[in-house]
Structure formats: structure tokens, C-alpha cells
Amino acid sequence: MASPTFSVRIALDALQSPGFYCEPDPEIGKRASEPFEDITTEAGLSFYEEAILNDNRIAEVLESSEQCNLTAYRTFAPDPTRIFQFRRGGKTAGCILVTLLWPPGSEVIYYLDSLEHVFPAVASDNGLWRVPKAAVTKVGCSSVNISLDHGGLTIQDGRTMVTFARGNPIAASFASDEFLRHWNWEKKTYSTTAQMEQKMRSSGNGKFTLYAKFVRPTVADNCE
């Protein structure tokens, strides 16, 4: 997928301030409406390659910022009353980039320049960091509501606070080699076959790496 109006420089500048880039896109909306499957399945891996890695906008941003290691891939449920961060710690915490594919009828709330600040946060039940509203109010971060009636794409700094107001976005998080080394980042473990492992490892065409380790399914896994 490509956009005739896309500028990687504009996108990279937006990631610096206010901390995210957004582009409505009905084609992405259509793809994001498909049932989510993890990349350990043939269908899920194919979707990841086609909808994320083969999207020129995403690829250009990731390559330009050297954020080329996939660290997480999943979907999120709507959660309109809570505020989250993928990465906490402010300026010194290091950057991960998160691409989100939004289905039609979605709404996302971003908190402008929130990546500049260190907020108190607690581990949430969805795997992210939850920031109390009182802390956001105290710092004075303003917010913007973005309605993606026909779906679309957002790319954000992981430290930028977000609320999943409506819709189930598909999220892929990426980090640089330097970030992973510096923070001694833990690899995600995938349980899959040797054949599927090989397909997953080769999915980035030499440009993108799956930051993960693999184990073989147990008998109990196969019975689930």
C-alpha cells in the first residue's frame, strides 16, 4: 500500500512532536477488519507481511529510524476510559515505534508531546502501562480525538500516551538493535513448528528481524 501524499520526513517529524503520525486509509480499514491471527499461523504471518512490512509508509519510517526488529504483534480491545503507554520513562527511556492498523469506526485519543514526560504508571491487564488521569492532568498534556470512520494507520512513539476509544487496532512494535542491546530487552517466546519458525525468520526479507526465541509445541499445546 502506498499514499501519494505521504512524506517520510513529515512522519518522522511528527513522531518527535506531537509523538504520532496518522493517516486515514479505507484500504487499511478493510484489512484491519479481518479476524486477527497471530504470526505463528500461515494466515497471520501473511497478513503481517502484506499489511505491515509491505506498506511503504511503515517500511520507510522504520528503515529511516533503524527500528527494524519486531518485538510484539497483537491486537487490543477498546478501552475508552483508560490511558496507556507502550513504553514508560520519558526522554531517557529510549524509543520503540508502534504501528497500529485501525478498522472502520475506530477512534483513538493521543496525548500531545506526552513522550517528553515521566509519568507514574502501573502494569495493566492488557500488557501495557496504565497512566492515572490525575497524573496527565497535573502535567497538562492536551489530547486530540481522532475519528477513523473508514479505518486508517497510526505510527507512534511507544512513550506517547494513547487511549483506544473505539475499534480493535492491530499493533506491531519495533525497536532498534541499539535499543535492544542497551536495555537487555527480553525476547518474546513463540511455540511453533520448525517449518513455521523458518518462515517467520525469513519474513522480513533481510530488512526486518523478528526479535524472538522459539520452542517446539508440547503434547499439551497440541491438545488445546
Image (tube, helix red, strand yellow):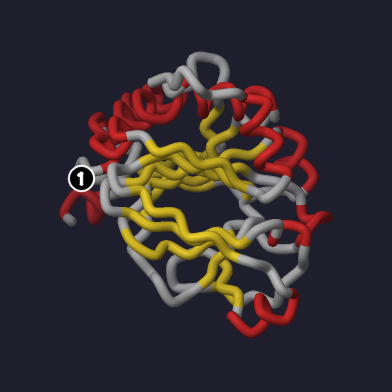
Residue at image location 31% in from the left, 57% down from the top: 167
Q: The C terminus appears in which quarter of the rendering? A: bottom left
**Dividing the picture into quarters, in which one does residue 191 lie?**
top left
Query: In the image shown, does 30 or 211 lie closer to the viewer?
Result: 30
Q: Residue furthest top?
A: 205
Callout 1 crowding tier (Cα within 10 Å): few <14, some 14–19, many ≥20: few
Instruction: Name the element at disc 1.
Output: loop
The residue identified by callout 1 is 35
Above or below for 184 versus 45: below
Residue 163 in sight: yes
Q: Position of residue 192 (x, y in %)?
A: 33, 38
Residue at image location 62% in from the left, 52% down from the top: 158
Residue at image location 49% in from the left, 46% down from the top: 72
Q: Residue furthest bottom?
A: 134
Residue 203 in sight: no
Query: In the image shown, does 71 or 92 lie closer to the viewer?
Result: 92
Q: Amino acid at mark 1?
A: Pro
Residue at image location 65% in from the left, 45% down from the top: 96
Q: Residue furthest left?
A: 223
On screen, residue 6 versus residue 25, left or right, reads right
Q: Position of residue 168 (x, y in %)?
A: 32, 55
Query: In the image shown, does 75 or 190 lie closer to the viewer?
Result: 75
Number of on-image labels: 1
Query: In the image shown, does 50 or 61 lie closer to the viewer?
Result: 61
Q: Position of residue 127 (x, y in %)?
A: 49, 64
Q: Position of residue 19 (x, y in %)?
A: 66, 49
